[in-house]
Image: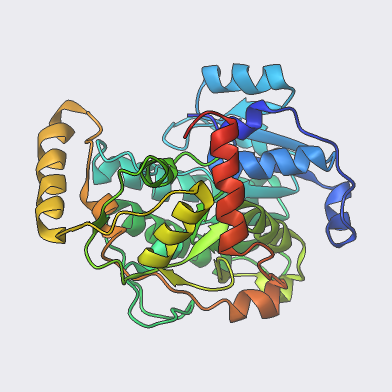
Amino acid sequence: MINPSLLDSPVKTPLPVEYQLLSTKKLLVTGAAGFIGGSLLKRLVEYDLDVVGTVLNQEEADTLTEVGYKVEILDLASKHSWSSILKNIDIVFNIAALFQEVEQGEEMYKKVNVDGTLKLAKTAIEVGVERFVHCSTVGVHGHVKEIPCTEETPFNPMDEYHRTKLEGELGIIRLGESLSASGMTITVNRPAMVYGPGDTRMLKLFKSIADGKFMMIGSGKVLAHLGYITDQVDSLLLSAIRPRDDVHLEAFNIASGTYITLNELANLIADAAGIKLSRISIPVAPVWFAGLLCEIICRPFGIKPPIFRRRVGFFTHNRAFALDKAGQKLNYHSKVDEKNGIQQTVDWYREKGLI
């Protein structure tokens, strides 16, 4: 599904001084139809920079071309050469990934998130790309083993998406370690739970609360760490302009300034929507087993299950991250707090008739 915010014409915006280095560069954004990739592409176009996005298929390409974006088709699972797409590109933002396609097996996740990612990075090296900013996920730490979780906290991936994203980012780091001192600069960006205008992944949560149908699964005391989309885009741009010594072969947690409980998150959404939140909660175990059963039944038929274990994990896994490293080396500092970000998101959903 194309990020809906891409369908609104970009509004030209002066390029901030801190990003002036990008004005002389040719940029490429993979996964440009998605939420993060599309938001990044739109920001770069609004800055009037030389950027091309890649999308998965011709339908997406035609839709975005009609709006005025420059796009190419690039499928990370394909066997095609991507040299012609990457030729003369200075900076690659690799956002594309297989995500929440539960009907797919781990083999396809590996084909896209590991093999395709490494092939893209190797091709970028071969054609002379200067920088490669790879979008991974804080999910490589899964149910975090320490609070707050740092970039050095032991990994704890919980499913095929997180396992393959971890394998992909570690493969890219190893690839970078084999390069010369003047080789391509490689940086790993690990977003937390990104939300905001253009997002449809968290729409179900926002809508269920706004409609008064939400019931917490479990205690609601587990920790969540969100990241507003404009902050996330800022972090990607900073990854592309900071000195090589600060970012080469480094991974960065990216999120908003503080982590909160799920109860606090639900209350913030309810307040923004102007409704009273239900206090009814559901035990975790029956929902988890229902998710497992749905996956078992649906996967052989290639059908996306209505509920799956990873979604249940949202209510059971702590996510809380330290941002010190990103602050020190990227100069990343969240600008949008949860209250304002959630209100802006609710307003956008309503404007688009989604809630």
Residue 169 position within the rendered picture, expressed as x and y whole percent measured from the top left: 47, 61
Residue at 70% from the left image edge and 71% from the top image edge: 330
Give the vertical position of 42 relative to 334 (above or below).
above
Left or right: 110 as drawn, with respect to 225: left
Q: How is the image coloured?
A: rainbow
Q: Nearer the viewer, residue 55 or 289?
A: 289
Q: In this view, does 295 lie to the left or right of 64?
A: left
Q: Which residue is drawn at 90% across and 59% down?
A: 17
Q: Which residue is drawn at 48% across and 51% down?
A: 118
The percent coordinates of residue 297 (x first, y second) are 10, 35
Q: Is residue 122 at all visible to an observer of this figure?
A: no
Location of residue 230 with respect to 37 vertically, above or below: below
Tell me, yes or no, if residue 347 can be seen here. Answer: yes
> Would residue 273 appear left or right of 300 to someone viewing this image?
right
| Residue 265 pos. (x, y %) | 43, 61
Q: In which quarter of the image is residue 246?
A: bottom right
Looking at the image, residue 239 sits to the left or right of residue 175; the answer is right
Q: How many marks?
A: 0
Q: In which quarter of the image is residue 54?
A: top right
Residue visible at 9% across and 53% down?
A: 286
Closer to us: 66 or 346: 346
In percent of width and height, residue 293 lies at 9, 43
Q: In which quarter of the image is residue 58?
A: top right
